[in-house]
Image (cartoon, helix red, strand yellow):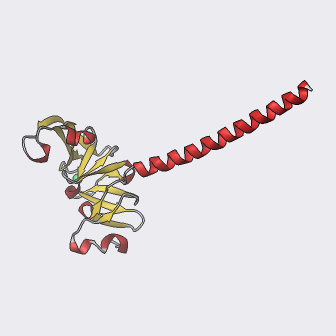
Amino acid sequence: MEYDESVLIKRSDGEPVTAAVDKPMTFHCAKCNTLLADSFGVCGESKCLDSIACLRVTKDVVIADASKVGHKGELANCVYSSVKCCDCCSTVGKVILSAPSHLAALRSLVLLCKANLNCYILDSSSMVKASTLTFDLKPLRDDIDMVMQQFEAKMDQMLCIRDRLAERSGTSELYVDM
Ligand SMILES: [Zn+2]
């Protein structure tokens, strides 16, 4: 294994503090290293479930047909199915089928448990435990505000051009009338 400073400096103390959202990486079963997903499918992290929320996973991830009902802890009042690694059959996460409102945003996403994952970081060619990384996405509000500003600036430009054109066509009509 090679180690990249930016990833592993913080690993020695075991603190999961390295933001990993922008780093391309693949997620592997910690037991057998089967490829389970990649960072392009990640849409956030659930701290309370210690899981990475994925929109897409590989065909080596199997969602169990049988569903379970959570009675205690974070999964109380949830209906969920286990997610297994197809190769070694170990449980690597879950899919929440039905949940109270505080977990509603996670419904139907594949939640890969960080404790059962290793991450291969492409830029540094290093394999690290998922628990050493964080996958928080930055809020979309800033991006939306920026796009709105750009849109409004374009709108002003277009209105300005329209007014100028209207002015010009008014002037040419005036010439024609004369
Ligand atoms: Zn496995």
Say above or below: 39 vs 128: above
Q: Is residue 32 left or right of residue 22?
A: left
- Residue found 40% across the figure and 51% down from its top: 40
- Identify the image quadrant of residue 78: top left
Say above or below: 86 vs 163: below
**Residue 139 in sight in this render:** yes
Instruction: Tell which of 63 and 6 is nearer to you.
Output: 6
Measured as percent of width and height from the top left, residue 173 is found at 85, 28
Instruction: Tell which of 27 and 159 is nearer to you.
Output: 159
Q: Which residue appears farthest toward the left when viewing the image? A: 71
User: Which of the image's four quarters has the C terminus?
Assistant: top right
Q: Is residue 128 left or right of residue 89?
A: right
Measured as percent of width and height from the top left, residue 31 is found at 21, 58
Q: Which residue appears farthest toward the top when viewing the image? A: 177
Say above or below: 70 vs 14: above
- Identify the image quadrant of residue 1: bottom left
- Residue found 62% across the figure and 42% down from its top: 156
Measured as percent of width and height from the top left, residue 35 is found at 31, 53
Instruction: Tell which of 134 and 171 is nearer to you.
Output: 171
Instruction: Tell which of 96 and 32 is nearer to you.
Output: 96
**Residue 31 in sight in this render:** no
Measured as percent of width and height from the top left, residue 10 is found at 28, 72
The count of marks equals: 0
- Residue found 28% across the figure and 66% down from its top: 17
- Residue found 66% across the figure and 40% down from its top: 158
Q: Is residue 48 left or right of residue 176?
A: left
